[in-house]
Image: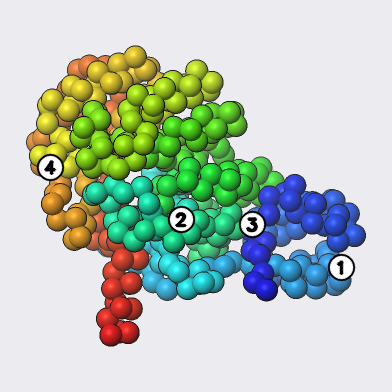
Amino acid sequence: MQKTSIYSLTKPALQDWLVENGEKKFRATQIWDWLYVKRVRAFEDMSNLSKALVAQMAATFTFSPLKPLVVQEAKDHQTTKYLFQLSDELMIETVLMRHDYGLSVCVTTQVGCNIGCTFCASGLVKKQRDLTTGEIVAQVLQIQHYLDDQGEGERVSHIVVMGIGEPFDNFDNVMGFLDIVNDQKGLAIGARHITVSTSGLANKIRDFADRDSQVNLAISLHAPNDELRSRIMRINRTWNLTKLFDAIHYYLDKTNRRITFEYIMLNDVNDHPEEAHELANLLKDIRHLAYVNLIPYNPVAEHDQYSRSPKKRVMAFYDVLKKNGINVVIRKEFGTEIDAACGQLRTEKMKELDNIQK
């Protein structure tokens, strides 16, 4: 029987396991401290626990379910990309980004993706399975361990849930992950330093609003009308802009928290002044809580019908939004030369393995 990662357990779940195994609840606080503050990598290092409890934990749980396969660092040292192998030999990607405000980790939530965005490397391989809570937590811990080993006292301060997969299609495991990394007696990554991005599962946006969390929400929008969005994002055929914005209004009414709208600039597809005006009009009623992030496109060989919008056109798009009172920024680029678009490194590794097998 395959062991569960200890990182899969929220603190209440760990307390329940301890009680079921004849231990006191307070041991959960001790174990939590070993896992997320001292960040030990073996049960035997938990020196204030009984030998019997350590043995029981070692027999029941494993630590990180991730095996590092490839580590790529950008020339400017601002981005490091990790390709990890899971216990079933499937592969995922995680990215560390160095910002002026701290170190941010972009985590993956699924192996592959079924959302079907025509410009995205993540969807080149269909979803094979959801990641467990432990497999998502382990991505952050694995990178924090790398930082710990460098001995410079750096720590992960921000998390973006924007890697391979649709986070809200793996809702329960992602929510468990958020509870664990946000715990103030553990990794203590503040809710306002965490952002979850969804392609627009309107029903789950409502569920997320009902959690009344301080975690930030981002919407992968990428088009301001249904015809264009349905063409480049298959999810829009199920959750069109009317349904999506009904859910967004529900979220805003419930939380009064700002939403980021991500918009990848695709040359001669969604980057004309007409789309800029449509986007401004779409957001006009919520512009006090809307924040648009214009994203340079990371080219994907398998999607050669798309290319990056010229800088002049990006600036013209930006100017239209600004003149219409929309808060907008152009995202700083990270790691283009190391295949940092979600799914690219994994796809290249899969091709390499296929060639070896042939």
Residue 8 is tagged as 3
Q: Amino acid at mark 4?
A: Asn
Q: Which comes sooner in the sequence, label 4 or label 3?
A: 3
Question: In the image, which is nearer the foreground, mark 1 or mark 3?
Answer: 3
Q: Residue at x 47, y 53 (%)?
A: 109
The relative height of residue 55 versus residue 108 in the rendered view (above or below) is: below
- Depth check: 345 or 210 in front? 210
Residue 16 % position (x, y): 80, 52
Neighbor class of circle 4 (other Cα within 10 Å; few <14, some 14-19, many 20+) is some
Residue hosting label 1: 50
Q: Residue at x 9, y 36 (%)?
A: 312
Residue 299 is tagged as none
Q: CA distance from mark 4 to mark 2?
A: 29 Å
Residue hosting label 2: 110
Question: In the image, which is nearer the foreground, mark 4 or mark 2?
Answer: 2
The relative height of residue 19 versus residue 44 in the rendered view (above or below) is: above
- Which corner quadrant of the image does residue 296 belong to? top left
Residue hosting label 4: 267
- Which corner quadrant of the image does residue 262 belong to? top left
Q: Secondary structure at mark 4?
A: loop
Question: In the image, which is nearer the foreground, mark 2 or mark 3?
Answer: 2
